[in-house]
Amino acid sequence: MKKRSILTESDLRIARARRAMDEIHVAPDTFVTPLAKEYLRDHGIRLVQDNYAPMTKTTQQAPGFIEEATGAAIAQKGEYLTHLHGRTLVPKDHPRIVLRGMLDTLQAKVLLLQTEACAPLLRRDLGDILEAIRQILRAEVKDCALPEAPLLGMDEQTLHRMSHEIKETFGFDHPIPSADMGRIALQLNLLRTEIRAVERSAVTAFPPGTAQERTDIIRQLNRLSSAAYLLFCRTLAGYYKEEDCHGSAATV
């Protein structure tokens, strides 16, 4: 790797994608960002500082911020910049920042839908979707692996089968949304489309075939859209027994 004054986690990801490595050599005055140190530790990569020389007062002082695109030190964070991680700054329209905003909005919409849902089982299933969104956001912000976990109590294969074989699962064909389906059903259908939009944003933020690729996040968002569609179909099939929103059984 080309020697430079700042070593970031992004540098390490790109270098490791190009070749296997168990150690990396840097100049003695190189500033290694905290996330880069964590990446080195997690992947068992040894940091070697060549031609060691005692650190001066200047090299002991880490820059206030680092611009991700150039690696340049920045004394103050401008209004058009925000934190990608640690002290690393990016423009507020950076694809990963856009993705974070869309995930945040998605959480807010699921929470509102939970308040409207009068069926306890639907609120529970929406809670599963909400937790999955939060796990995605955590994995993206912390740049860590997304843990494997069931969704709606199903593994990936079962969820895929049930959401694609609607006729076999519910006894009707894939439904075409219409105004007479009711507000909750149509809100769930809208949730499905919004998750799809977040998935497209994630593909932009983590392009396939690059060092930034995150197939775990893309796959989980795909599963989430299937889960939202399954909730939509369950609602149409009468799977969820509604109660009034004060907790007592609804009258018919």
Image: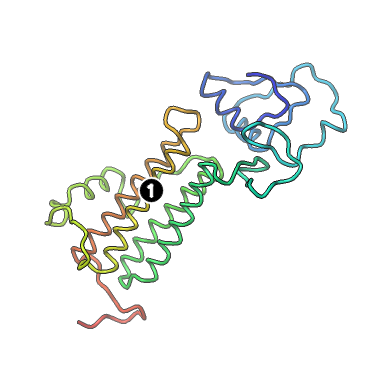
Residue 32 picture location, percent across and down: 70, 31
Q: In the displayed structure, would residue 199 be above or below residue 32?
A: below
Residue 178 picture location, percent across and down: 20, 62
Decide which of 196, 49 is in the foreground and name it.
196
Identify the colour scheme used.
rainbow
Would residue 92 appear left or right of 57 to someone viewing this image? Answer: left
- The quarter of the rendered structure image containing the N terminus is top right
Residue 12 picture location, percent across and down: 59, 27
Q: In the displayed structure, would residue 23 be above or below residue 94?
A: above
Query: On the image, which quarter does residue 238 sit in?
Result: bottom left
Q: In the displayed structure, would residue 194 be above or below residue 28?
A: below
Residue type, mark 1 in image: Ala
Residue 81 picture location, percent across and down: 64, 45
Decide which of 18, 64 is in the foreground and name it.
64
Kindly give the residue lying farthest to the top in the view shown. Answer: 51
Judging by the rendered image, the residue that carries numbered circle 1 is 197
User: Could you tell me which residue is drawn at 52 percent across and 40 percent down?
Assistant: 144
User: Could you tell me which residue is drawn at 59 percent across and 31 percent down?
Assistant: 10
